[in-house]
Amino acid sequence: MKRKIDKCDSLAVAHINLKKEFDFIVETNIEYFKRVSEEEAKRIQLQKQYDESVEALKKKKSNWALPTSLGVVGGLVVGMLLSN
């Protein structure tokens, strides 16, 4: 009878220890998934800001053609005048 009681006590202790370990793992996983969710929300926000800035750059008119052509023509005229 004593052996059965000792066996039951050791099983109860093992069960309690396993339950504590399982609870710790569950708490750790909850913390981990909470952090992952926060990081995912930050990533989504940053991606949205990036996409908006790219769209703003695409919509911005590029006014480089006129100043560039004036610079090239001006350079050619000055070059011709200096070479004569």
Image (cartoon, rainbow, N blue to C red):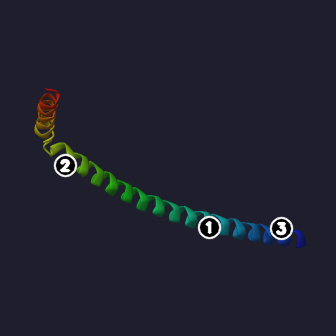
Q: Is residue 54 above or below residue 65?
A: below
What's the residue type where badge 2 is placed?
Ala
Of residues 34 and 69, which is closer to you in this image? 69
The circle on residue 56 is 2
Q: Residues within 10 Å of mark 3 (few under 14, many from 20)?
A: few
- Quadrant location of the N terminus? bottom right
SS of the residue at dot 1?
helix
What's the residue type where badge 1 is placed?
Phe
Provide residue 81's location: percent of width, then percent of height.
12, 31
**Residue at mark 3:** 7
For residue 42, what is the image quadrant?
Answer: bottom left
Q: In this view, does 18 lie to the left or right of 75?
A: right
Q: In this view, does 55 lie to the left or right of 40?
A: left
Q: How crowded is mark 1: few (under 14 residues within 10 Å), some or many (20 or more)?
A: few
Q: How crowded is mark 2: few (under 14 residues within 10 Å), some or many (20 or more)?
A: few
| Mark-to-mark CA distance, 3 and 1 | 26 Å
Name the residue: 38% across, 55% down. 43
**Residue at mark 1:** 24
**Quick one: label 1 or label 2, which is nearer the N terminus?**
1
